[in-house]
Image (cartoon, rainbow, N blue to C red):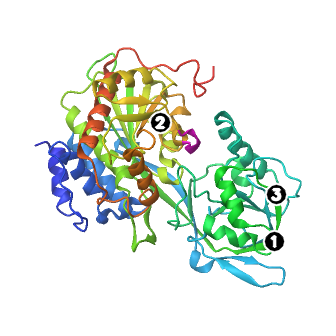
Amino acid sequence: MSKSIALSLSLILSSSLAYAQQTPTPAAAPWWNLTTTLASDSMEGRDTGSEAYERAAKIVAEHFKADGLKPAGDDGTYFQRVPLHQVDLDTAHSSVELVAADGSYSPLALLYETTLVPRADLPAFTEGQLVFIGYGDQSVDIDLHGKIVVYFNNLPASLTAADREGAVVRRARTLAQSGAVSTLSIDNPAAIEPSHWPAAYARSVTIKGAVRAAVATGPFAMRISAEAAAKLFAGTDANPIKIIADAEKGLPLQSLALARKLRMSLNLTEKDISSPNILAILPGSDPKLAPEYVAVTAHLDGYGYGTPVLGDNLYNGALDDVAYVAMLIEMADKLHAHPPARSLLVGIFTGEEKGLLGSVYYTQHLTVPKESIVADLNLDQLRPIFPLNILTMEGIADSTLGDTAKAVAKQFNIELRPDRETERRLFSRADNYSFVRIGVPIASFIFGYNPGTEEERIYRDWYARRYHKPQDDLATPIVWDAGVKFNDFYRALTLAIANNPTRPTWNASSPNAPKP
């Protein structure tokens, strides 16, 4: 038994036993034991900047040390501390109300009906007339200056697939320059990935000292559930049920000056925090290739404690994403005695759920030369909850990694596909995107399915009931063979890249390729 696995088994004895027990297959047991350690209630959801996250980070570092991986953090340690600034909305001392023309008002329940992204520069009190502008994707004849702009978070069905992503960017830019004091987006309950209620909390975390993007300095963003949105149209002749039904289908919507104002009293708290990335190197075995690195990455942070869902207020984040931190630990345990030609750079990032903060900071403060990183293979968005026959690969057409991954997938009878739901922006919502921004080719994977199958039903159900909720815990039913099959595929792909004398290259046709 390796030191790393022995360490995991000793830690698991102290983990919470409150979950319905699942018995992994022998092949899955080492991976799941590590997952159980890191996703147990004792780890308290590992929120960025929390003491529980620090404890989890130390456990990961201890595993790396036990497997003989070299520290790749600051000052000869496994840790790269990321300086952060946190802003919280104190919901107990804040309010959002709809105000009628006669001065009467009705509240909107924070975190249950509406929520916002807090910023340090938000005023303590805001009041503005509500204006509905359809999908917000085109110019309107209503003056938006000083208003609170309401739009439905969908796009017209008439837009082509190629136009849809551009329309989202245009909407953000238009609203940022509109002079509106706030935006209020109505959730689309028919979205491929519907928004979740209640919100865990209203909190924002940024890298300390970072300059906000221009769009973030415009009107602050709020959202409202489709169920609560009907209240916005009170006092008008509009039929909110029809508006929302039409909006779900992407049918044309008319702009409308609403009869009510929205009034907000916000109490914000701020503090500086920090949280570490955990970085380690498995040195390569080939003297010529060892100075180059294949980055293998995942994120350790979750949401910690938040708004209760079905009586549970602890957001464990088992599959998102410590199951894949555990997978990287297990892979290092299997490879350290016989490492590949190139070195492996193992990056376990913090703050992913707050906006890819740990990976952004790392790629801005690299601990190895940028030119030496040949690829990033990121682990996120993976759910082994049905048999593995299909994988979506982000970045499949961007570089030669796509061909390598297809060849490896064929060995496992896995069909590799491009992303068929690009409107979800999964490519740019995970830590791999931070590497793309510094010119490193990437690969990231999602369990795939054919439309209308039981696999799709299970996938959609997981996003509706467990994703970013307390129910992403150790009671999630796992298909053990699927988990092991993916883990074996990922390890084989890592070795194929690390042992190939030719490093991956960008395809000239890729829109993500570095500009000359």
Residue at 41% x, 54% y is 462
Q: State which tag comes first along the sequence, 3 or 2.
A: 3
Residue 404, horizontal then vertical, whole percent: 38, 21
Q: Residue at left 49%, top 53%?
A: 353
User: Viewer-proximal residue, 32 or 375?
Assistant: 32
Tell whether position 424 is magenta.
yes
**Position of the N terminus by quadrant:** top left
| Image coords of residue 441 (percent x, y) | 48, 27
In the shown orientation, is residue 469 left or right of residue 240? Answer: left
- The magenta segment is 421-425
- Assign a secondary structure to mark 2: loop
The reply to whether discs 3 and 1 touch (Cβ–Cβ < 8 Å) is: no
- Of residues 211 and 185, which is closer to you in this image? 185
Q: Is residue 403 left or right of residue 254?
A: left
Above or below: residue 132 compared with residue 25: below
Question: Which residue is pictured at 55% across the width and 58% down the height?
Answer: 195
Q: Give me the C-alpha separation between circle 3 and circle 2.
A: 48 Å
Residue 484: x percent and y percent? 25, 40
Distance between the Cα atoms at labels 3 and 1?
12 Å
Q: Which residue is under mark 2? A: 366
Packing grade of label 2 (10 A; few <14, some 14-19, many >=20) is some
Q: Quadrant of the C terminus?
A: top right
> Which residue is disc 1 drawn over?
236
- Report the front residue among 286 and 446: 446
Which is the main secondary structure of the residues drawn in magenta? Answer: helix
- Label 3, on which residue? 255
Q: Is residue 342 visible?
A: no
Badge 1, how many Cα within 10 Å: few under 14, some, many 20+?
few
- Amino acid type for the residue under numbered disc 3: Ser
Mark with earlier residue (3, 1): 1
Q: Is residue 181 left or right of residue 269?
A: right
